[in-house]
Structures are given as structure tokens and as C-alpha cells.
Amino acid sequence: QVQLVESGGGLVQAGESLRLSCAASGRIVTVGVMSWYRQAPGKQRTLVATISGSRGTSYGDSVEGRFTISRDNAKNTVSLQMNNLQVEDTAVYYCYAVIMTTRSGYNAYWGQGTQVTVSS
């Protein structure tokens, strides 16, 4: 079984920064794309940023230039550096990864989510 465990959420003021981290563990053979999604109350879950195994990245329009996604392939981790946070960034942030395990092909996995709250 695979687990994704997020950390780093919290309460900050507008303009401040936070760094989220997510670690994948289990019977992992290789990790493909890794992403961060977020879901605000009453809204759909949306893609924030994604990074491929070769470290190609893409971002949602609302975070471009403020957030940076990175990964450590040796440790099976993905991070999201969030700068100049705004109130509208308040949401539960979820880690997502496509992972090949020793018992199956590639499957998609989600973390449990971490709350980010930005106050004005």
C-alpha cells in the first residue's frame, strides 16, 4: 500500500509564505507526475501545480509567479513553496501522485489534505 502524507499547512497573514511538503511511502517502484490540488469550502477541487518525473512544471493561473513546486526523486517527496499568500488561497491542499508499486502498475494516490488559512 502507498501513503501520501502532507505537512506544512497553517494560518498566516496575507503577504506571508508557507511551504507544504508531501512524502510518499510504501512499496514504491517509481513515482510519476506529482501535483498539488486545493479545495475551498463550497468549491470544487482544482489543480494548483504539477511536476513531472523529469521536473517539468505547470501552474494554475491564479498562483503563477507566486507558488513553486519541486520534488526530490530520491526521497519521493514533493513540495510547494507558496509566497505572497492571499485570502483567496485559503483552502485544504491535497497532494496527488501517480505511483507504480511492486504489486501493480501505475495508480493515482491522494494525501489526506492540509489546511492553509490566510487572513487579511
Image (tube, helix red, strand yellow):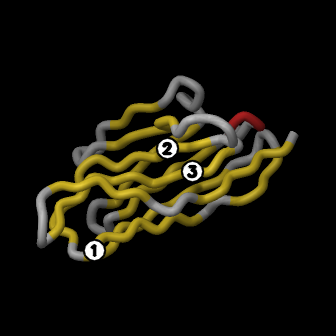
Q: Residues within 10 Å of mark 2 (few under 14, many from 20)?
A: some
Give me the residue at 38% from left, 62% from top: 77
Residue tagged 1:
1
Residue at mark 3 to residue at mark 1: CA–CA distance: 22 Å
Q: What kind of element bears circle 2?
A: strand
User: Which residue of the protein is positioned furthest toward the front in this rendering?
Assistant: 42
Q: What kind of element bears circle 3?
A: strand
Amino acid marked by disc 1: Gln
Q: What kind of element bears circle 1?
A: loop
The image shows residue 81 at horizontal and vertical percentages of: 56, 49
Residue tagged 3:
93
Q: Residues within 10 Å of mark 1 (few under 14, many from 20)?
A: few
Residue at mark 2 to residue at mark 3: CA–CA distance: 6 Å
Marker disc for residue 58: none
Compared with residue 34, is residue 111 higher up or lower down, i.e. above or below?
A: below
Quadrant into which the C terminus falls: top right
Compared with residue 107, is residue 37 higher up or lower down, i.e. above or below?
A: above
Q: Residues within 10 Å of mark 3 (few under 14, many from 20)?
A: many
Q: Nearer the viewer, residue 13 or 29?
A: 29
Amino acid marked by disc 3: Tyr
User: Which residue of the protein is positioned furthest toward the top in this rendering?
Assistant: 61
Amino acid marked by disc 2: Tyr
Q: Is residue 75 left or right of residue 22?
A: left
The image shows residue 92 at horizontal and vertical percentages of: 62, 51
1 and 2 marks in contact (CB < 8 Å):
no
